[in-house]
Amino acid sequence: MKVVKPVFTTLSAGIFAVIGLSFHSTAFADEITLRIGSGHPNGPAVYVTDTAEFFVPEVKKRVEAETEHTIEFVEGYGGAIASVAETLEAVQNGILDIGAYCMCFEPAKLFLHNFPYYAPFGPQDSEQQMKAARAVYDSTPWLTDVFESEYKQKLLGLHGWDNYHLGTTDPWDTVADLKGVKIGGAGPNLPWLEFAGAVPVQSTLPDGYLSLQTGVYNGWLMFPSAYLGFKFYEPAPHYTQIGFGAMAVNALTMNAKKFDALPEDVQKILVEVGRAYEEQAGTSLNTRQKAGLEGLAEVGAKLKVLPEEARAGWAASLAEFPSQQAKDADGRGMPGTEVMGKYLEAVGATGYEWPHSYELK
């Protein structure tokens, strides 16, 4: 005898399957996971600390409060996912969804984005520096657009380094004493050393302690927050406040494809929190600059201040540097002269007075 399977059973199975799939899809859509990271560690590097302790929790809080979604971050700082020189590419390739990095480690791809380095002895105050850099980005869309057009990522916010000074293993009294001394730096700041006759050495923060300890170089162009945080004062206790300036050269970017795939309300929050991350950067950096100098004094580092006359002479020796870098950028098909001109104007608008006034030629 042939048994006829009830039609409602088949239909019900199909309906329940669709309903189940629907619930699964909704649940999946509600739970967003993003990979975020940096080559520098959380703690000694202020921009990474602000990424981990401001950007991440603020995005999570707002997404949960303002949308029907939840969001989790898989965090990988200190090179756990990508090194300092790999982060831009990691975001571009989707290894990271969001990356925080210093543009100084992309001397070719982001050559012009390092424009603050090309006019040293600029704003000592990080709030002034961030304000000037933002003015340049706002008036030059190319600086923002190139992230997406060339590197498939969206710029969420800028950050920076606090005021650069110089730490050394040995004491020195005059700029002439630095002649022949090997000094490490990030790359775009190494030309600052030409006036002193020092020997520039390309390096990174994670390599600094051992390199100073073993004599790979005997000095570091470094801001107080990291000089204290990375304990560079142990192998190089002599710290001279020169005031090369604060530098807004760090970026927080997101893979464009990943960003576009997110719900619009989540996109809006990421953009707004990215800008808030940038807006609090100057205050955060100033706070860490002050704490860094105080901390170095407490641990016994030997602090001194370069006399203003020597500082002005050092700045004057670099008078041609902004023009040279602007023309170099022009030759690379970048708006170099435009950006450097706007930056010098933007710094002037903050009220800062250069020890030597730069003029583009």
Image: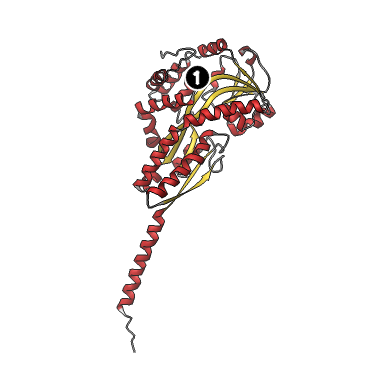
Q: Is residue 49 above or below residue 64?
A: above
Q: Is residue 152 visible?
A: no
| Quarter where residue 290 is shown | top right
Residue drawn where x is 62% and y is 12% of the image: 176
Q: Residue furthest bottom?
A: 1
| Quarter where residue 62 is shown | top left
> What's the coloring here?
secondary structure
Residue 314 image position (x, y, % from top left): 54, 13
Residue drawn where x is 61% and y is 13% of the image: 175
Instruction: Look at the image and tell me in which quarter the N terminus lies.
Output: bottom left
Residue 188 image position (x, y, % from top left): 51, 24
Nearer to us in this view, 182 or 351: 351
Q: Is residue 338 visible?
A: yes
Residue drawn where x is 48% and y is 16% of the image: 321
Instruction: Look at the image and tell me in which quarter the C terminus lies.
Output: top left
Q: Is residue 341 above or below residue 100?
A: above
The amino acid type of the residue labelled 1 equals Pro
Please indicate whether residue 177 sits to the left or right of residue 314 in the image.
right
Q: Pointer 1: residues within 10 angstroms few (<14), some, or many (20+)? A: many
Label 1: which secondary element: loop
Q: Is residue 22 above or below residue 340?
A: below
Residue drawn where x is 50% and y is 18% of the image: 121
Residue 69 image position (x, y, % from top left): 40, 52
Residue 35 image position (x, y, % from top left): 48, 46
Nearer to us in this view, 134 or 13: 134
Where does label 1 land, which residue?
120
